[in-house]
Image: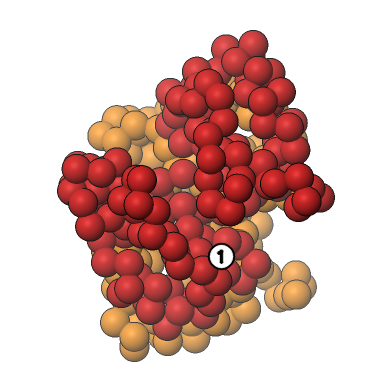
Chain colours: A red, B orange
């Protein structure tokens, strides 16, 4: 089954301004910054009173994040939940009729395995499953 | 300042089906159900592995939730965070330039005080502040 909330992901236009805004307004602390070449995505992970918030932006209008920003604007993009066995969990959800955007896990930050469910199967909410590398199993 | 995440609110078309779906797919447990006459909103609060998820629906297409459902469809609606002193917090945020949808708190479920921030001030994310009744102060 799925476990605890891993993070709430938010797409923003100006990443630096958003990091500063979430800090000034809500006391959020910056935990990490990373630029993902493959997807041309700029990522900042914040700690917002115990909840991790992942801010996503992109300098490239044709990237996935860039397209969403252009077409739908800023806002909550997905909710991410831990799982210990992502392949088994995807199979279980598929058997229950959930459409999968990723039939097999792909590589996320720091060697994590990630996969997205099709939001048409989950009331319009884009849900990501994430499995930590072996050493981080909880 | 704002405190911990209180809940993630999701607007759904069919509340009964969504409660069952979140249970079957993700093991979410139903904590409470309530129908709010004033706003014609049907509310279900679920525990999803430690995170409270508030499912919102409405039988009335002209209600606030009904309009959002018709215009934007299902999906994440707002993020709600605890605060101990909602009036002071609204004043602090206003001084920092945040536009407020509720300049003064209004009454939420179970005697809570709630207020929404204008999402144009918070990167497209609709944020609710919630203060528990006195006896529940943490």
Residue nearest the viewer, comparing A116 with A132: A132
Image quadrant in which you'd find residue B102: bottom left
Q: Position of residue B30 (x, y in %)?
A: 72, 35
Is B125 displayed left or right of A107 in the figure? left
The answer to whether residue B4 is above or below residue A88 is below
Q: Residue at x 75, y 70 (%)?
A: B136
Q: Residue at x 63, y 23 (%)?
A: A90
Q: Residue at x 65, y 67 (%)?
A: A50
Residue nearest the viewer, comparing B78 with A131: A131
Q: Position of residue A128 (x, y in %)?
A: 54, 38
Q: Position of residue A58 (x, y in %)?
A: 28, 55
Number of residue marks: 1
The answer to whether residue A3 is above or below residue B60 is below
Is B124 displayed left or right of B136 in the figure? left
Q: Residue at x 53, y 21 (%)?
A: A103
Image quadrant in which you'd find residue A34: bottom left
Q: Quadrant of the C terminus of chain B?
A: bottom right
Quickly name the residue at label 1. Answer: B81
| Circle 1: element type | strand
């Amino acid at each position: 089954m799925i476990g605890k909330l891993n993070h709430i992901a938010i797409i923003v236009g100006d990443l630096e301004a958003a990091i500063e805004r979430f800090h000034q307004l809500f006391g959020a602390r910056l935990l990490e910054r990373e630029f993902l070449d493959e997807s041309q995505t700029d990522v900042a992970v914040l700690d917002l009173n115990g909840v991790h918030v992942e801010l996503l932006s992109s300098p490239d209008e044709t990237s996935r994040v860039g397209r969403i920003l252009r077409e739908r604007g800023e806002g909550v993009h997905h909710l991410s939940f831990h799982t210990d066995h992502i392949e088994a969990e995807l199979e279980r959800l598929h058997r229950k009729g959930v459409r999968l955007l990723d039939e097999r896990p792909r590589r996320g930050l720091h060697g994590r395995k990630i996969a997205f469910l099709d939001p048409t199967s989950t009331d319009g909410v884009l849900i990501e499953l994430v499995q930590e590398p072996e050493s981080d199993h909880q």
